[in-house]
Amino acid sequence: MLLKLIAGLNDRDNRFEAAKNLAGYFGCSYLFVFIIDQEIGVLLPAPGFPQTLPDGCAWQSFINNCPNDGCYSGSLPFPEKQMVLPAIGISGPENSIIILLGGNPSAGEVAPLKTISPILISLFTQESIHSAVKTKVAFAEKTVAKAEKLASTIDVMRTHLKDALIQKEKDKKAIEDLMEKKDEFMNVASHELKTPITTLKAYLQVLQKMVPATALSSAGDFINKANKQIKKLTDLVDDLLDVNKIQAGRMVYQFSDINLVTLIEEIVEQTQMTTLTHRIVLQNNSSVIISGERNRLEQVLGNFLSNAIKYSPNASEVVVKSELTNKEVKVSVRDFGIGIPLDEQEHIFDRFYRVNESSRKFSGLGLGLFISAEIIKKHGGTIGVESNGAGSEFYFTMPLVKVVD
Ligand code: ATP
Ligand code: MG
C-alpha cells in the first residue's frame, strides 16, 4: 500500500492526488512535494502544489540547502515560530523529489518523522533504484529490439542492392554487346555498300564517254543526276564509316601546315557549284597558316555549308567569315534559315541527334556535326553555334601557326 502511494508521486499528472493520499496515510494535516530541477539546481514546488507554507512563509529560504540528488532526511526549521517540520528527500529517475510531511505548526503539532522517515527512505530508495533499473532495462530492451529490426532491414536492403547491382552489370553487358554488334554491323554494311557504289561510278563514267555528243543534252542530264545521287550515297557511307572509326578510336590524322585561305576558297567554290538557290559570300578571309589535316577540315566546313543551305530553304545567301585574334582563327558560316531552339543547341553535336522540327522536313542522319566536333577537338580547337531564331552561325576556332602577309 505504502509503496503504491509513494510510486504515485512519480506520476507527474496525478502527483497532487498521490501526495494527499500519502499525507492521509501518515495522519498528517498537510504535505508538500517539491521537485529539484536538476538542470538549474533549484528546488521548485511541483506543479499543482502551493508555492508557500500555510501561514504565507516562503519555502525557498530554508530549503536551499537540500542536496540535488541522493536522499535527504532531517528536519527543517520553521521560521518565526521556530517549529520543526519533518522532511525527507529522494532522488527519482527524472528529478529529485523532496517530500515534506507536516503536522499543524501553529497548533504546535509535529509530524512523527522519526517513525516514518526510515521507512520512507528505504522504500523510496528501493523504489527509485528499482524503477531506474526497470526504466534502463526497458530502454535497453527497446534499443536492442530496434537495432535488431534495423539490422534485419539492412540485411534485406543489402540483398536487394546486391541483386540490383548484379542485374545492372548484366544489363550493362547486354547493352555493350548490342552496341558492339550494331557497330560491327554498321561497319560491315558500310564497307559492303562502298563496293557497288564504286562500280556504279565507273559504269557512269563509261556511259558518259559512250553517249554521242548530240544526245548528251538529255542523256547527260540524267547522267549528272545519277552522279549527284551517287555523291550523296558516297557521303552517307563515308559518314557511317567515320562514325565507326571515331567510336573505335581508329580515326587517324596526318597533320601538315595548311593555308586556311585557300582551303576556305576551294570548299566555298565547290559547294557553290552544287547549289543554284544560294549565293555563298566570303568575308574577311584572313591569310593564315594552321596545322591540321586538310581533308578533314574541308569535311567540317563542307558540313557547315551543306547544313546552312539545307536548313535555310527560303533564304538566298550564306556568309562565310574568318576572323583573327592573337592566338587563333575563327571560321564561321552564317545562314538565314530556320534557326535552332536554345534548349536543342547543346545536343546537336551528339551522335544521330536531330532537332525534331527539322528532321520531319529535311533528310539526314544527324552525323555531320558529331563528326565535325570530333575532328575539331582532335585539332585542338573549339566548335559551337549561335542561333537566335533568325538563322544560325556555326563556327570553329583553331590555334594559329602563323599569319601570312
Ligand atoms: P547529316 O548526317 O546528313 O549531316 P543532319 O544534317 O541532320 O544529317 P547534323 O549536320 O549533325 O545532321 O546536324 C544535326 C541537327 O542539327 C540537324 O538535324 C538539324 O536539326 C540541326 N542543324 C544543323 N545545322 C543547322 C542549321 N544551319 N540550321 C538549323 N538547324 C541545323
Ligand atoms: Mg548535316
Image (cartoon, grey):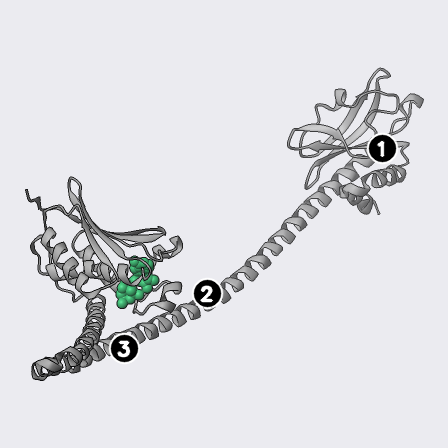
Q: Residue at x 10, y 81 (%)?
A: 214
Quadrant of residue 216 in the image? Answer: bottom left
Of the four image quadrants, the one with ligand 1 is bottom left
398 or 214, nearer to the observer: 214
177 or 66, nearer to the observer: 177
Residue 365 at x, y = what percent?
Answer: 29, 69
Rendered image: mark on residue 181: 3
Q: SS of the residue at dot 1?
A: strand
Rendered image: mark on residue 158: 2
Sequence order check, earlier mark of 2 and 3: 2
Q: Look at label 2 and name its amino acid.
A: Arg
Rendered image: mark on residue 185: none
94 or 132, nearer to the observer: 94
Residue 248 at x, y = what percent?
Answer: 20, 68
Q: SS of the residue at dot 3?
A: helix
Residue 42 at x, y = what percent?
Answer: 69, 27
For the C terminus, the quadrant is top left
In the rendered image of this protein, does residue 171 appear above or below residue 113? below
Q: Residue at x 6, y 44 (%)?
A: 404
On the image, numbered disc 1 is attached to which residue?
Answer: 31
Visible in this render: residue 367?
Answer: no
Q: Are marks 1 and 3 in contact (CB under 8 Å)?
A: no
Q: SS of the residue at dot 2?
A: helix
Mark 2 vs mark 1, CA separation in Å: 60 Å
Which label lies toward us, 2 or 3?
3
Mark 1 vs mark 3, CA separation in Å: 92 Å
Mark 2 vs mark 3, CA separation in Å: 34 Å
Sequence order check, earlier mark of 1 and 3: 1
Q: Residues within 10 Å of mark 3 (few under 14, many from 20)?
A: few
